[in-house]
Amino acid sequence: MSIHLLTRQLNTFAHHHYLLVAAFVVISGLLVADTVEKRRRRYQELDSQGVALSANHGAAILDLRDRQAFESGHIARAIRTDEKDVSSRIQELAGNSTLVILCCQNGVQSTKLARQLAGRVAVPLAVLKNGLAQWQRDRFPVIQGREGKPG
């Protein structure tokens, strides 16, 4: 098949299916943008299983939610901290942890904070993708109360 025939067929297809071609171009652009953003990111996004595995291998988990939300259910061994104290908490944990995982209710607050802090702290950062809400949807256990009673 010659290149001219192939080009003509492609042009005919694009002319008759312009919406399909436009959708393909848009989706391809979004995939490229997502790939570029992931490569530039200086922190990891972990799913529930990734957080559980990392925590079992010494990662620290900082929970950014308020005290009441934390006490109603949090990840085992998570440390509740206010957003303004996160940087100093990370510095405290840097010697004992290979990774610090930030979590919040839905992933928005922790992702925003990770973007701000990544590259400026002495330990690698990660976030729980989609937050504690996803952790619970995935049916991972939570601990209730300040002392950590199984819930």
Image (cartoon, rainbow, N blue to C red):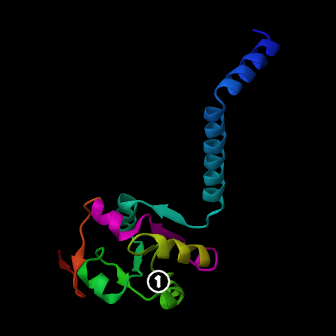
Which segment is the magenta one?
A: 117-137
The amino acid on which the numbered mark 1 sits, given as a three-letter code, is: Leu
Inspect the magenta stretch and tell me whether residue 127 lies in it. Answer: yes
Work out which residue is located at the far front of the displayed protein and give it: 16
Left or right position of 130 against 87:
left
Q: Can you give x and y, in whole percent of width and height, for residue 11 in the image? A: 75, 23
Inspect the magenta stretch and tell me whether residue 49 lies in it. Answer: no
The residue at the point 64 percent across, 44 percent down is: 26
Q: Which image quarter is the C terminus in?
A: bottom left
In the depicted structure, whether residue 2 falls above or below residue 26: above
Mark 1 highlights which residue? 93
**Front-most of 38 and 13?**
13
The residue at the point 42 percent across, 65 percent down is: 130
Q: Can you give x and y, in whole percent of width and height, for residue 4 in the image? A: 82, 14
- Residue 99 in view in this figure: no
- Residue 132 in view in this figure: yes
Q: Can you give x and y, in whole percent of width and height, for residue 27 in the image? A: 60, 43
The residue at the point 34 percent across, 79 percent down is: 78
The residue at the point 61 percent across, 33 percent down is: 20
**Considering the numbered disc 1 on the image, is that residue within a helix, a strand or a loop?**
helix
